């Protein structure tokens, strides 16, 4: 039986492990939310950042990617992921739908940080989450970078996420991150007057 790992946050754009296959996937009954505190990657113990977790949401689905692991890599990859996701996340098995609503169903591993873990920050108004993300930084970099990379990775997959893209819009204005970044790069480029 193949081992699949579901990515819905940084695993989408930075898996950092070998996989035999990567496919668009969804998890029914859950929604992606910036409700988990990060004291080890995008914040510190004194000033936690905010990263995504999954919360139960009947009738909704979280879209992301699923990675199929090679049997010979499975133990090492899961050990690495257990360390990476150690701040409140637990590894669960859930049914995933590959390639859209009519695609095949597989059982997959999902790292989920529930409301009872000590780093769970819980819900807040989007403008407060955006301000928190803007101010936070940890060993893995700025919390804002995490949010922007996730928003762009979702767009590249054709995934619309009101929560993630709503926070992004509050931080950047109504333009998508790609347009804002492209304009910033163009503005910083030399004019050619050498």
Image (cartoon, rainbow, N blue to C red):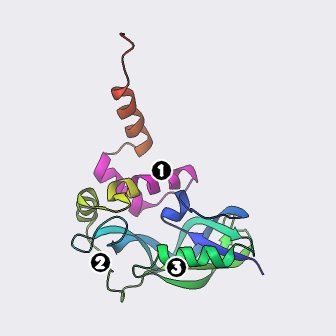
User: Which numbered disc covers residue 82?
Assistant: 3
Reading the image, the residue beneath label 1 is: 152
Please indicate, yes or no, whether residue 191 appears anywhere in the rendered image: yes
Q: Main secondary structure of the magenta part?
A: helix
* Magenta range: 148-172
Residue 194: percent from left, percent from top = 36, 10
- Residue 102 on the magenta span: no
Reading the image, the residue beneath label 2 is: 121
Look at the numbered disc 3 and give the secondary structure of its residue.
helix
Spatial CA span between label 2 and label 1: 24 Å
Q: Look at 64% across and 68% down and name the residue there.
A: 66
Q: Look at 40% across and 82% down and name the residue there.
A: 88
Which residue is more in the foreground, 87 or 66? 87
User: Which numbered disc covers residue 47?
Assistant: none
Residue 30: percent from left, percent from top = 50, 77
Looking at marks 3 and 1 on the same chain, the residue that comes earlier in the sequence is marked by 3
Name the mark nearer the viewer: 2 or 3: 3
- Residue 166 on the magenta span: yes
Look at the numbered disc 2 and give the secondary structure of its residue.
loop
Q: Look at 72% across and 68% down and name the residue there.
A: 102
Tag 2 near tag 1, CB within 8 Å: no
């Amino acid at each position: 039986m193949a081992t699949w790992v579901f990515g819905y946050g940084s695993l989408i754009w930075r898996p950092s492990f070998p996989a035999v296959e990567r496919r668009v996937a969804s998890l029914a009954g859950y929604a992606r939310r910036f409700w988990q505190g990060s004291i080890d990657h995008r914040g510190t113990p004194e000033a936690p950042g905010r990263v995504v977790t999954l919360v139960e949401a009947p009738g909704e689905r979280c879209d992301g990617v699923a990675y199929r692991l090679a049997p010979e890599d499975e133990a090492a990859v899961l050990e690495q992921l257990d360390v990476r996701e150690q701040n409140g996340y637990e590894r669960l098995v859930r049914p995933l739908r590959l390639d859209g609503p009519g695609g095949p169903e597989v059982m997959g591993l999902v790292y989920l940080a529930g409301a009872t873990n000590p780093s769970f920050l819980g819900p807040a108004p989007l403008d407060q989450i955006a301000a928190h993300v803007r101010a936070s930084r940890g060993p893995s970099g700025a919390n804002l970078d995490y949010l922007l990379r996730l928003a762009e990775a979702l767009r590249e997959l054709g995934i619309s996420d009101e929560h993630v893209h709503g926070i992004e819009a509050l931080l950047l204005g109504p333009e998508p991150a790609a347009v804002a970044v492209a304009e910033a790069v163009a503005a910083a480029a030399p004019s050619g007057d050498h």
